[in-house]
Amino acid sequence: MNEERLPAAFTAAMKEMLGQEADAFLHSYSLPRTQSLRFNTLKSIYAGAPAEHSVSLFSLTSVPWCSTGYYYEDPARPGRHPYHAAGLYYIQEPSAMSAAELLAPLPGETVLDLAAAPGGKTTHLASLMQGQGLLVSNEIHAERAKILAENVERLGISHALVTSAAPGELSRRFPEVFDRIMLDAPCSGEGMFRKDPSAMSEWSPDHVKMCAERQWDILQDAYIMLKPGGSMVYSTCTFNRLENEDTVSRFTAAYPDMKVVTQKRLWPHLEKGEGHFVALLHKAAASGSVETDSRGKKRSGGKSKNGPRVHASLRDAYQQFLGWAATELPGFTGGGIPLLFGESLYLLPEAFNERLHTGLLEGLKVPRAGLHIAHLKKNRIEPAHALAMSLQPGQAARHYDLAADSPELQAWLRGESLPVPPELHGWTLVTVEGLPVSWGKASLGQLKNHLPKGLRIQKAHLEEA
Ligand code: SAM
């Protein structure tokens, strides 16, 4: 894009901020945007060959600040390759990869991603956590939370809970619960103008002020939920000081137990990436009681003395699933607390119950209460798509593998059934070079397609790939 299209007030503010460097900064707008993907280590630990193949297929080169991040250039289209549908990687702007790297969550921790859709940082955090512990991924807007849940499923993440709540609703339930919090705040998006010029249409100095106020509000809720001794990353994709350094200093001034460990800007004229701001903050181990925070919010978190109540219908449903899994998923090891929402059976990560209790979910919108394992049909179990995506091929009693460049795989991703050897019978994990893409059900030489309708690919889309 051309720098002449930038809002005049934005250009003036950047010239003032950058002085002599402004020319180089403004010139970056006439260069192509950067494109990159990040491998999903939850998959590639057992799928070395597809990951290696991707490196040559898309001519990938390393992103210096993220060991799993790789640049690609036009005309590569990894987002349209079946490896993408199989969750082998996530398309993510390179500078955005710096936030989860900085937060560096550890396997087994309790982590919150407070503004998580569409899921770039959540999927990165899940990889770094190696699928262990508890990740709560929250998105306030219901439609965006749906996309977040789809990405969490596509990447086969089983230890995440997807919620859709305002930060205040969460902080009432989860005070001092999280070891680490990612707050990738809604912002004025100045750093995205090159990648997505439509981001300029909403920009104005007033919008920047509104964003800074909203960030301040959300930060206070994040504070309430952070454990003493815990860490938080505050990030934005804007250059504006008001939303970045000024918001961070307002926050640390109001909460003296919060200290800035480091803060950093990623500039498009200095790095190969779009604009980003990341700050790592640490909460002192002996903080004041949450009962006395500045907004006097009612507190309700903590571990229940009683275990979860298991209703008869839930017990029956889970028994039914275990019966099904005993023959169909001999290698299934998934632990967790069974939960029933209507006809959907979930496994809530074990870590949730060790540290919290299911009563805290009452009245909360939870699009995905952990791993969706099954749909209950009249007298039978149908395995859920999310379960397929979280498996390794060896865990299912049967799997049927297709090559990434085969016409059969293209037909499968469009939702068509496939002819298969007649001896194949029953629920079958369909894989592309070892990576699950969906369930199929084999009977009488046909493999019926159970890829959810919303995920099926249009013919034209595949041809363009
Ligand atoms: N972390 C995401 C990722 O890496 O894919 C991107 C998050 S985006 C920068 C900010 C998110 O904040 C948006 O999804 C937006 O819907 C959400 N949001 C908007 N208003 C909010 C509010 N008042 N509280 C919390 N989140 C909000």
Image (tube, grey):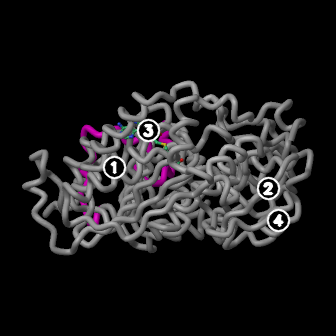
Q: Of the residues shown, which amino acid type is indicated by label 4?
A: Val
Residue that carries the numbered disc 4 in the rendered image: 55
Q: Earlier in the sequence, mark 2 or mark 4?
A: 4
From the viewer's perspective, is 344 left or right of 303? right
The magenta segment: 353-380
Closer to us: mark 2 or mark 4? 2
Q: Which residue is drawn at 50% across and 52% down?
A: 373
Q: Of the residues shown, which amino acid type is indicated by label 2?
A: Tyr
Residue that carries the numbered disc 1 in the rendered image: 247
Q: Which of marks 3 and 4 is nearer the N terminus?
A: 4
Q: Residues within 10 Å of mark 2 (few under 14, many from 20)?
A: some
Q: Of the residues shown, which amino acid type is indicated by label 1?
A: Thr
Beta carbon at label 2 within 8 Å of ligand 1: no
Closer to us: mark 1 or mark 3? 1
Q: Which mark is residue 72?
A: 2
Q: Which of 120 and 44 is in front in this view?
A: 120
Q: Residue at x 47, y 28 (%)?
A: 204
Q: Give the quarter of the image for residue 68.
A: bottom right
Q: How far apart are marks 2 and 3 (CA)?
A: 42 Å
In the orientation shown, which residue stands out farthest toward the front?
20
